[in-house]
Amino acid sequence: MTRIAILLSLLFSTLAFRGEDRLFHRPLVEDAYYYFQIARHAVEGRGISADGEHLTNGFHPLFFAVCAGAFAVTPNDTWAIRLITLFLALVQAFSAVLFGRFAAVVLGDRQGTTEAIAALTYAGSMFLFWQHQNGLETGLVLLLLLAVGLAFTRTDPAQPRSALALGALCGLLVLARIDTGILVVMLAGALLLARGSGPLWRRVGTSGVVGVLSTLVSLPWWLYNVVYFGSFVPTSGRAQQAFAFEMSRVESAVHAVATAASPFLYPFGEASWAMAAVVLVIPALAVAALASGAGRAWRHGLPDSEPARRARQYVTLLVTFALLLAVWYCASSWAAHFYRRYVSALSIPGALLLTAAVLTLKERSRWVAKGLPFVLVAPSLGLLLLMWFAPDRLVRSGFFNQLELVRAWVPENERVAAFQSGTLGFFRPAVVNLDGKVNPQALAHRGRMATYLDAEQLHWLCDVPSMILFGLGTTPEELGWKQVANTGDFTLYHRL
């Protein structure tokens, strides 16, 4: 079944060979095109910039390096994105393999089936399909979380040299996504507080190896942020920061946690309490299976080795880390549509829970064993088929409405402003980002965006009306803008 899992993940690489009418659309998301813009400009010698003019840090450096590599290999934009899509599929395949190995450490590999079933569970997950194939850093983060977990199981708190691999991987993890630094601190603390694992001075040394190595590996990124932008936090994070307590955010955060904890399925549509309850049915059934008589008997066979105990400790740390992020982003970020991605680390414990339940059921019924591969691969295989054969309206990104609107009305030699400018800025030059994710100048004018538009002498503005209202603080008409046209959710404005 491990081979089936790898084959399924590699099948996702076929997404790279779709026609251009689909390649640029789902499962890629709008923010993926910020990576593509910045990588292309860097390779062209125009600096680390989204618009070719202003320096930016609105990205995570490890995946940016991958994208830059793709654009360095080929000057053709289409083929560069094909290469990135291939990379995403390989990352998912490797992640499925690592998850299988990690699950075997946590649960024990009875009859040699745990690793295979776990790999298949990971590869077949709808939630993980979206996280790996969205064109962002999330899949790379998940891969490194699994690699870090395996390294943690092999680290002896009493042997500082055993932490060398863990420290280096933690540094790469921070380069993949900056907020994982919280998890790195938790891991270093766990090694320090591992009583009964050698004298304190050795545990201090082991913890220090993780802290020092991870800092050294990620240091260039920290320095780049502070020297050029005056903050450790990238503009992509600061642009979405707005502290508030809102029930709509709480609802989205609970929905995100429920979705990540139940990665087998993926609820489309808006976040809601009802949908959160629905997706939690699968984890609830898994817990019920493990609480049954057969489940209790199965749990008695869980390994009690030191690596197994460390692996289970890592799972606990992952859950704590993901819940901390859920609380933090709920309080600090208005971008509720990203909460699921922010707490994606919770999908690893969620997939482990499902794997354990499947192993319990497999021992009770040979019919379950026979039908298992088909059930586990169905969700992501179904999504793959949808990406290939579903009607265009289901696959097409709505941001291409924005692009078509601008192409139809705005002269090519004139600049156009947009709060959401990923797709638009990749396919059209002379686009000014307004939400500040990749434009520090716009971020500096947050709350005074009308002043920035005047200073930059911008005469075209295109975005979703609600986003424009949110960014400007008032309607465009009150500032002298006139509506020109609209397509889909997007409206184009102009002023003389």
Image (cartoon, rainbow, N blue to C red):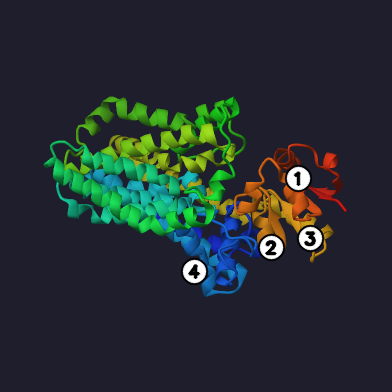
Type of residue at label 3? Arg
Residue 475 sits in which quadrant?
top right
Q: Which mark is residue 407?
A: 3
Look at the numbered disc 3 and give the secondary structure of its residue.
Answer: helix
Q: Are marks 1 and 3 in contact (CB under 8 Å)?
A: no
Q: Earlier in the sequence, mark 2 or mark 3?
A: 3
Q: Earlier in the sequence, mark 2 or mark 1?
A: 2
Residue 325 lies, with reference to residue 441, above or below; the image says above
Q: Residue at x 75, y 53 (%)?
A: 455
Q: Could you tell me how far apart the alpha carbons at marks 4 and 3 are, in whole angstroms? A: 29 Å
Q: Could you tell me how far apart the alpha carbons at marks 4 and 2 are, in whole angstroms? A: 19 Å
Q: Nearer the viewer, mark 2 or mark 1?
A: 1
Type of residue at label 2? Phe
Name the residue that disc number 2 marks: 427
Q: Earlier in the sequence, mark 1 or mark 4?
A: 4
Q: Residue at x 20, y 44 (%)?
A: 204
Name the residue that disc number 1 marks: 450
Q: Earlier in the sequence, mark 1 or mark 3?
A: 3
